[in-house]
Amino acid sequence: MAQRVFYTILGIVLVGAGIFFLANRRTPNPSSTPERSTPAADLEIQVPSEVKKAAHYESNTPEAGAILPTPPPSVVIDVNFDLATGSTIEILQNGTDYGSGETTIDGNKLALRRAMRQDAPDGVYTVTYRACWPDGSCHDGQFSFGIDRDLLTTLTDSRNTSEVTIHMSQIKFSPIELRISAGTRVTWVNDDAVAHYVNTDAHPAHTHIPTFNSTELKKGGSYSYTFTEPGAYPYHCSAHAGTMTGLIAVES
């Protein structure tokens, strides 16, 4: 009798131990996602939107804080006073200048510009510039923008197409963001009853690409422009500049 009780108790103990083991055993889950070594937030491009304005500053392209899918063809600073020799622009990332060629002053002396290398890597860029005036004085300014080529996959892809149409309808461009090949002719058609424009940034200077600007387009009106140089081209309708914006990424 005592022996039977002993074995009964032993069996209960062994069964309980087995249940505890199974309940606490960690079985690998093949569908689980491994933890990131870097937090997701640290993998995103975060660009300061602050602008250090030099004297007589008006605007700049790209816009401060903007994140573009490719480098812009050039960086432009707009002012309201005649610029003079000695004015410069640097487009910096980690101490390397990704500007191309010399800084130039537009014929009206109110815009300072410098081309940007199209092989510039993704990341945050700090534009530092010096605006000099006829009296020999100079003032410094600064702003930042970002490049993230992953954004290219979110654009309407019309590469390897010779002509593309963008409709202006319900106070917006359609498509809003477009990806094309160099040499593509883009035509904007106004389907709205109100007038629209196609203007390069920045508003109201429209200086980024001076030749990329339409006159007033009434209902049924159209405007065409052929993009020959690679880069990101932000643009807007100057009649609805706060809401009606678009972007074209041109690839070689």
Image (tube, grey):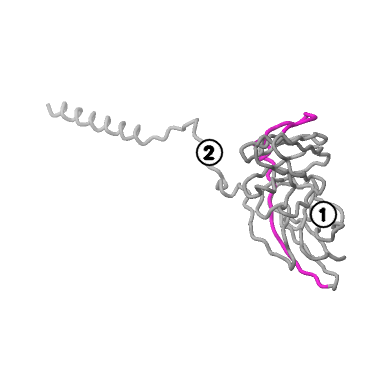
Q: Residue at x 23, y 28 (%)?
A: 11
Residue 1 at what x, y percent from top left?
12, 26
SS at badge 2: loop
Q: Amino acid at mark 2?
A: Pro
Residue at image location 83% in from the left, 39% down from the top = 228
Give coordinates of residue 52: x percent, y percent: 69, 64
Q: Which residue is mark 2?
A: 34
Amino acid, disc 1? Arg
Q: Nearer the viewer, residue 41 or 221?
A: 221
Percent across and percent down for residue 244 are 65, 44
Q: Is residue 14 above or below residue 127?
A: above
Please tell me in which quadrant of the rendered image residue 119 appears. Answer: top right
Magenta range = 137-165
What number is the disc on residue 114? 1
Q: Quadrant of residue 85?
A: bottom right
Q: Residue at x 71, y 45 (%)?
A: 235
Relative placement, left or right, of 207 versus 43 is right
The magenta stretch spans residue 233: no
